[in-house]
């Protein structure tokens, strides 16, 4: 049997169609929640450029079960910059975690995993904003080319405003590029098999003439077992 491709890259229509059954106001409030992300206290920079919230869930056919909030940990072998450190991020807001929009997005992404879905009953959800100014670029992935330490990873663009750069690149396990993409349309998505690929993102810079740039992303990590250690 020919193995399935290790990633899928699709336009905004997939999530737009899934969210079309929900009130437009609910979707607007969901995407607007990126304006309320606190600074990532683990960057180690004088001026924050990354803002973040995080939550984890057990995936049921008709709902998401929110799991207890906990520190986020990644092995040093996976993340050379922040690995080996327990990072406690702010939790997702209750309206986001318990809303129909997140539930719809997670279930839709799970149906588009580039490989077997059996056992993929747990996920981690990251809301991330990266900002940039002419004097300070933003780094979506300061660890460079890396794995996240999960089974599958979905990268969903929420907003891209006055930004240049931020090109996503996927690599095979020998670090040979296999796919490059500049996510530009809200809800455009890449879903990858984290066991078969590495990935990275180039720095975020403001567009020419702009005083600042903003790139909002939602990352959803899929894995088996609600009690395993979470890594990113």
Image: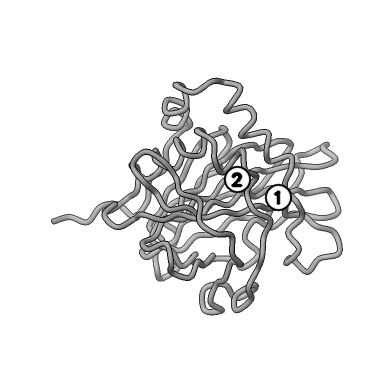
Q: Quadrant of the N terminus?
A: bottom left
Residue 141: x and y in percent read 62, 60
Mark 2 — residue? 217
Residue at image coords 57%, 28%: 27
The furthest residue to the left: 1
Residue 9, compared with residue 227, is above or below; it is above
Label 2 crowding class (10 Å Cα cut-off): few <14, some 14-19, many 20+? many
Label 2: element kind: strand
In the drawing, what numbered circle is on residue 206? none
Query: How many residues crowd mark 1 within 10 Å: few (<14), some (14–19), many (20+)?
Result: many
Residue 84 percent across, percent down from the top left: 60, 79
Q: Earlier in the sequence, mark 1 or mark 2?
A: 1
Instruction: Determine whether, in the image, residue 29 is placed left or right of residue 101.
Output: right
Which of the 4 image quarters holds residue 99?
top right
Using the image, determine if residue 64 lies above or below residue 162: below
User: Disc 1 versus disc 2: distance between alpha carbons?
Assistant: 8 Å
Q: Position of residue 80 (x, y in %)?
A: 60, 76
In the foreground, 105 or 129:
105
Quadrant of the image containing the C terminus: bottom right
Closer to us: 139 or 129: 129
On screen, residue 9 above or below 171 = above
Q: Which residue is mark 1?
A: 130
Q: Quadrant of residue 177?
A: bottom left
Q: Are marks 1 and 2 in contact (CB under 8 Å)?
A: yes
What colour scheme has been applied to the protein in the rendered image?
one colour
Residue 175, by quadrant, is bottom left
Q: How many marks?
A: 2
Q: Residue 211: where, in percent of width, then height?
A: 85, 40
Q: Is residue 180 left or right of residue 113?
A: right
Element carrying mark 1: strand
Residue drawn at point x = 42 percent, y = 37 percent:
10
Residue at 74% x, 42% y is: 36
């Amino acid at each position: 049997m020919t193995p399935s491709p290790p990633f899928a890259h699709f336009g905004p229509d997939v999530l737009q169609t899934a969210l079309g059954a929900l009130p437009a106001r609910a979707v607007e409030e969901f995407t607007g929640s990126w304006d309320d992300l606190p600074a990532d206290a683990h960057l180690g920079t004088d001026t924050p450029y990354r803002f973040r919230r995080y939550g984890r869930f057990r995936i049921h056919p008709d709902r998401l079960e929110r799991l207890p909030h906990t520190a986020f940990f990644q092995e040093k072998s996976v993340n050379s910059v922040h690995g080996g450190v327990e990072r406690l991020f702010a939790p997702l807001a209750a309206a986001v975690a318990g809303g129909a929009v997140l539930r719809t997005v997670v279930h839709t992404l799970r149906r588009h995993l580039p490989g077997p879905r059996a056992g993929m009953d747990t996920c981690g959800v990251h809301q991330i904003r990266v900002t940039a100014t002419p004097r300070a670029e933003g780094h979506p992935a300061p660890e460079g080319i890396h794995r996240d330490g999960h089974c599958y990873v979905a990268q969903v663009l929420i907003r891209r405003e006055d930004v240049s750069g931020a090109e996503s690149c996927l690599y095979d396990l020998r670090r040979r590029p296999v796919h490059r993409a500049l996510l530009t349309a809200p809800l455009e998505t890449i879903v990858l098999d984290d066991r078969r690929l590495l990935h990275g993102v180039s720095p975020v810079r403001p567009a020419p003439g702009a005083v600042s740039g903003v790139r909002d992303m939602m990352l959803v990590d899929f894995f088996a077992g609600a009690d395993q250690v979470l890594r990113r």
